């Protein structure tokens, strides 16, 4: 039976990935697209890159929201009396 290939880790889990950097890249891409100076292929490539960065940011924020919710739940369950 063939072994399933391991899925690569999402970029947002890499130690050198930063939310702020990814968002700055999206902003740069949006400015490039707004100029209208890119040919269609370049515009599509840049648009796709921006969507990818936004998906990374969304996953990052969802993961952090889950972590915060779990931390709050842990605090709520502590008997601090």
Image (spheres, rainbow, N blue to C red):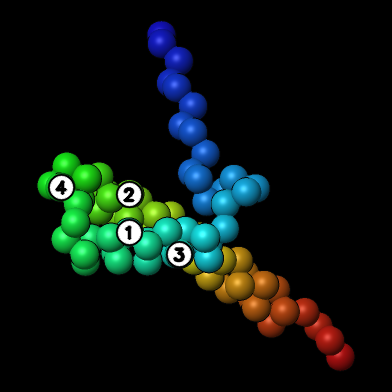
Determine which residue is flagged by label 2.
Answer: 49
Determine which residue is flagged by label 4.
Answer: 39
Q: Residue furthest top?
A: 1
Q: Residue furthest bottom?
A: 81
- C-alpha gap between disc 3 and disc 2: 12 Å
- C-alpha gap between disc 2 and disc 1: 8 Å
Q: Is residue 6 left or right of residue 44?
A: right
Residue drawn at x 25%, y 53% is: 47
Determine which residue is flagged by label 1.
Answer: 29
- C-alpha gap between disc 4 and disc 1: 14 Å
Circle nearer the N terminus (2, 1): 1
How far across and how far down the image is residue 28, in percent?
37, 62
Callout 1 environment at 10 Å: few (<14), some (14 to 19), or many (20+)? some
Whether tag 2 and tag 1 are in contact, CB under 8 A, the answer is: yes
* SS at badge 2: helix
Circle nearer the N terminus (3, 4): 3
Q: Residue furthest left?
A: 40
Give the number of the disc on residue 24: 3
Q: Is residue 29 left or right of residue 10?
A: left
Give the number of the disc on residue 21: none
């Amino acid at each position: 039976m063939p072994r399933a290939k391991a899925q690569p880790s999402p970029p947002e889990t890499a130690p050198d990935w930063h939310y702020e950097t990814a968002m700055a890249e999206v902003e740069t891409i949006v400015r490039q697209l707004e100029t209208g100076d890119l040919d269609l292929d370049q515009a599509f490539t840049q648009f796709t890159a921006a969507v990818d960065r936004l998906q990374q940011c969304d996953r990052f924020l969802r993961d952090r929201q889950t972590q915060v919710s779990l931390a709050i739940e842990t605090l709520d369950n502590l008997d601090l009396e």
